[in-house]
Image (cartoon, rainbow, N blue to C red):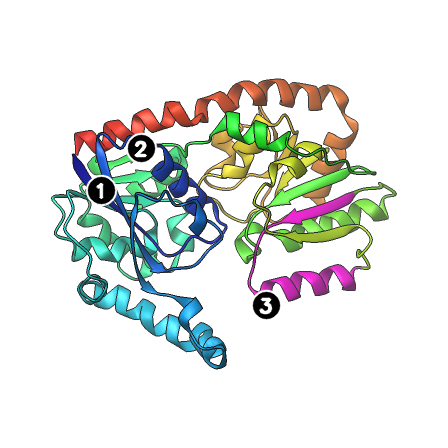
Amino acid sequence: MKKIRFSIMNLDGGGAEKILVNILQHLPRNKYQLSLFLFEKSGVYLNDIPDDVDVKYFMNPDKIPSLLKQLYVSVIRKVAYRLLMYFPNLIYQVCGVKNVDLDVAFIQDTSYLLKTSHAKKKIAWIHNNIYNTPTFKNGLRRNLSYADKTVCVSSGIQHLVCNAYPELANRVITIYNPSPLIKIYDDACKNSIKFMSPTIIAVGLLKKQKGFKILVQSVKLLISRGINVNLRILGAGDSQNINELGQLIVDLDLSGHVELLGFKQNPYQYMKAANIFVLSSLWEGFGQVLVEALCLGVPIVSTDCIAGPKEILQDGECGLLVPVGDVEKLADGIELLMTDIKLREKFIARGLKRAQDFDLPKIMTQIEALFDEV
């Protein structure tokens, strides 16, 4: 039985975290003994870790006294991350991490651990545009050199990695993120949610990458054109990002049209009830929410990031692609998809078929093959 350890920063409500939990839940136990290393024991998906997965962690924010919470966020966590970058062996020693056959750094931030790992084989997983991550200028090339394989979640990301590190190109592959399509659809049907007016849904962590400020401005433009539309944004975020986005909504007098719903354990019931799904990201690696929207038959408007959306939407055959960071073009795309019934129907039909390419059983077969090969 092969011993495999995954490492990730935490289990907050992002796409990579959700994907890792899906993988942990569906890898066969007769082949693999699984463990998980968390830089922080935190996140909305903690309770979704299977009971038989051995979990180790470096820090537990819940154990920090309330008087030190602010200090933890502003100082302690940053210092601890420097330890991860420069003294990864110390991190593993403190946490009592055991040797394994295969060490999987499931996100770029934990790729530093590959240097110190005594595993027989090592894999790095790249979920995002490498040029937009701090690790790119802080040792990512070196980190990936320790990996026997580097997995990219899209061909676009593989292209970026191979261009940046041509000497590693023969070890870089693409495996799409697995999506449990049947469960997604079943969860969407659990509760009947109805919106009283045309509604746009967006889902993602409330951070700069997701371009929600641009989306909110696009809604303002649509309303100024006389188009009655509401926007609902689902996703967690830190207090600063929530406050900034909330203030923008107030400043643009959109309180009656835009609502931040926070993180939802089951976002699919909201997605299914929406008229349009919008991904407004400035950059992506894959765009997991696009696959979920395709599966639920929701027409999509997405920014045409360097990697991810164009690949999922097959160059605009399964959804509308608009330029990144362009408020007016995003508003134009939403207006077009709101009014063009034939285009909506075309995207829905093609999208339902395209979603099958990312179904969990199909992708898990590829992941198992990788683990068995290395």
Give the vertical position of 142 relative to 298 (above or below).
below
Q: Is residue 101 above or below residue 98?
A: above
Apparent side of residue 153 relative to residue 198 in the rendered image (left or right) = left
For residue 87, which numbered disc appears in the image? none
Q: Nearer the viewer, residue 298 or 313?
A: 298
Residue 91 % position (x, y): 23, 65
Mark 2 touching mark 3, by CB under 8 A?
Answer: no
Q: Residue at the location (55% across, 57% down)? A: 207
Q: Nearer the viewer, residue 161 or 229?
A: 229
Residue indicated by mark 2: 27
Label 2: state its secondary structure.
loop
Q: Which region shows up in magenta? A: 230-252
Mark 3 neighbour class, 10 Å CA radius: few under 14, some 14 to 19, many 20 or more:
few
- Please name the residue shown 22% across and 35% down the image: 32
Q: Which SS class for mark 3?
A: helix
How far is mark 2 from mark 3, CA to CA?
A: 37 Å
Quadrant occupied by the N terminus: top left
The amino acid pointed to by label 3 is Gln
Q: Could you give the CA–CA distance between mark 2 and mark 1, rounded to whole angstroms?
A: 11 Å
Q: Which amino acid is tagged 2? A: Leu
Q: Are marks 2 and 1 in contact (CB under 8 Å)?
A: yes
Q: Tell me which residue sits at (47%, 41%) in the image.
A: 306
- The location of residue 168, given as percent across then percent down, is 21, 42
User: Which sits earlier in the primary sequence, circle 2 or circle 3?
Assistant: 2
Q: Which mark is residue 4?
A: 1
